[in-house]
Image (cartoon, rainbow, N blue to C red):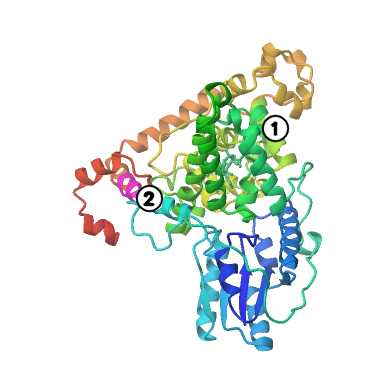
Amino acid sequence: MHIAWFKRDLRVWDNEAFTNACKSKSVMPLYIIEPKLWEQDDLSYRQYLFLKDCLKDLDKELKKIGHNLIIKSGDAIGIFNDINNQYGIKEVWSHQETWNFWTYERDQRLRSWFKLQNIKWNEPKQNGVIRGLKNRDGWSREWQKRMDISPFEPPKKIKGHKFISETIPSAKQLGLKNDGIEIIQKGGRSEGLEILESFLNKRGKNYSKEMSSPLTAKNSSSRLSTHIAFGTLSIREIVQKTTLRKKEIQKLSKDEKKNWPKSINTFLSRLRWHCHFIQKLEDQPDIEFKNMHSSYNKLRNETNNNPFFESWKNGLTGYPMVDACMRSLIKTGWLNFRMRAMLMSFASYHLWLPWQKTSKYLATLFTDYEPGIHYSQSQMQSGTTGINAIRIYNPIKQGIDHDSDGIFIKQWVKELQNAPKKFIHMPWENLNYIKDYPLPIVDELAARKAAASKIYKLRKEQSHKIESNKIYIKHGSRKPRVKKIKKNFKIKKEDIQKNLF
Ligand SMILES: Cc1cc2nc3c(=O)[nH]c(=O)nc-3n(C[C@H](O)[C@H](O)[C@H](O)COP(=O)(O)OP(=O)(O)OC[C@H]3O[C@@H](n4cnc5c(N)ncnc54)[C@H](O)[C@@H]3O)c2cc1C
């Protein structure tokens, strides 16, 4: 018997692992709910609700081709052991997974166990992420090649005998408590396909112009992140459908085109970024915990019960745009890129909090939590990669630029309901309008300057530069700069291929 083990690929369409497993005489379509995974501090109630929708939808898709989804709850090795004792497993098929450290270690243990049991574990590639990559040269070409492959079609009928499923445990049974979510994004492939279609044909028209404001991005961004994270749609099918749409747009008249061409290209570049960022975690799983650049190790210390952390996590910093973003995220599970970056930057620079702590909290709030993107971005917005420009967002300016009338702020920060436009971004300037809203917990300008000076001082050191260049060669996207680094440091091509520098 073969097992099609669904992980973060909850679909039957363009699922190479599933399609291949179905070539055997008997196949069990399996999903394992691992209680220990759901105990980790980056997982949450809202993510589990989305997962449950996806599992129900996947079950429907599978039934159309002759078998329901088999759910088992428990430790993965224990479950495979039971199935093996009962039926004898010949091969297991699942996509390569680049997820959090817990799943990385689980897969290491499983690999040894499968070997001992003589079970063949096949792991086809899931997206543009390359396992065992030596360096980034040619990565983009390889990504495109993978995106051009025809999607894998599911079989017309699943063969073999029928297996019995357990029911999906409730969130409560897994010890997951309601985390304040009020507007829940619906999971499942049918929902994912609908929002892809509405984005490519209607909502995405002004994407490039409207993606930065939380007011407009809510509708103009694709909102596909959670579907991509759970794999209800494959990144390849999204790229292919977007490329087809791009060709259609090219044929439109100037009047019909308007902002479409720029928006489609911006969106395509984000789809590539998706894999570019996950590749970093694939190449270096410890960036979930460790600063990418070691110079920053002693810069921010882990402090428990830091009052700044409590104010930031509850949206009580006294900076309206920061607080509105945090409160909106708590209730909806989603935020646009710029505002995520601002939240992280404010925590890491103005409040000088360690990203290791704040990123775990944000992970639980993002229904679309994707560790590869999340930790790379968290480090980037905290200045610890050593290879990216330092960008310290001024939350007052962000508010004025992207919510000038304070509509978004008033929606989420009810205490500022009566503040006029003049004071909405700096309510401390007229205390008459503040009832229960806190005063700023730090002085914005002073905190920004202090953070910048500490970071720039470090970045000037020669040892910082040397390590930065090595990191750039390992993780950086290939722009002309890499040639300059290779030349300056006389790194031989053979050494780069062997990763010996
Ligand atoms: C601190 C921080 C943490 C983040 N954590 C996550 C996370 O856990 N999961 C997640 O999916 N995204 C994360 N992002 C990236 C980005 O904010 C979200 O992908 C985006 O807001 C999701 O909305 P959307 O699907 O409408 O995106 P769109 O703008 O429509 O983009 C389409 C897709 O491209 C990918 N993408 C978009 N922006 C980026 C980016 N900057 N880097 C990498 N891939 C990108 C995503 O898969 C996204 O769904 C994070 C960003 C920051 C600054």
- The residue labelled by disc 1 is 316
Left/right placement of residue 198 relative to residue 23 reads: right
Label 1 SS = loop
Q: Which residue is drawn at 60% across and 33% down?
A: 339
Q: What residue type is labelled 2?
A: Arg
Residue 222 percent across, percent down from the top left: 62, 39
Q: Which residue is drawn at 65% across and 42% down?
A: 197
- The residue labelled by disc 2 is 141
Residue 241 percent across, percent down from the top left: 56, 46
79 w.r.t. 85: above or below: above
Q: Which residue is drawn at 30% across and 45% down?
A: 469
Left/right placement of residue 68 relative to residue 265 reads: right
Give the residues drawn in magenta, as a range. Answer: 468-474
Left/right placement of residue 364 relative to residue 276 reads: right
413 w.r.t. 114: above or below: above
Question: Within 8 Å: ligand 1 and the Cβ of disc 2?
Answer: no
Label 2 SS = helix
Residue 94 percent across, percent down from the top left: 57, 69
Ligand 1 occupies quarter: top right
Label 1: how many residues lie within 10 Å, few (<14), some (14-19) or many (20+)? many
Kindly indicate the quadrant of the structure image that contains residue 331: top right
Circle number at residue 174: none
Quarter of the image for the N terminus: give it. Answer: bottom right
Asked whether residue 315 is in view, the answer is yes
Q: In terms of depth relative to the viewer, which is nearer, 224 or 309?
A: 224
Asked whether residue 94 is in view, the answer is no
Left/right placement of residue 255 relative to residue 186 reads: left
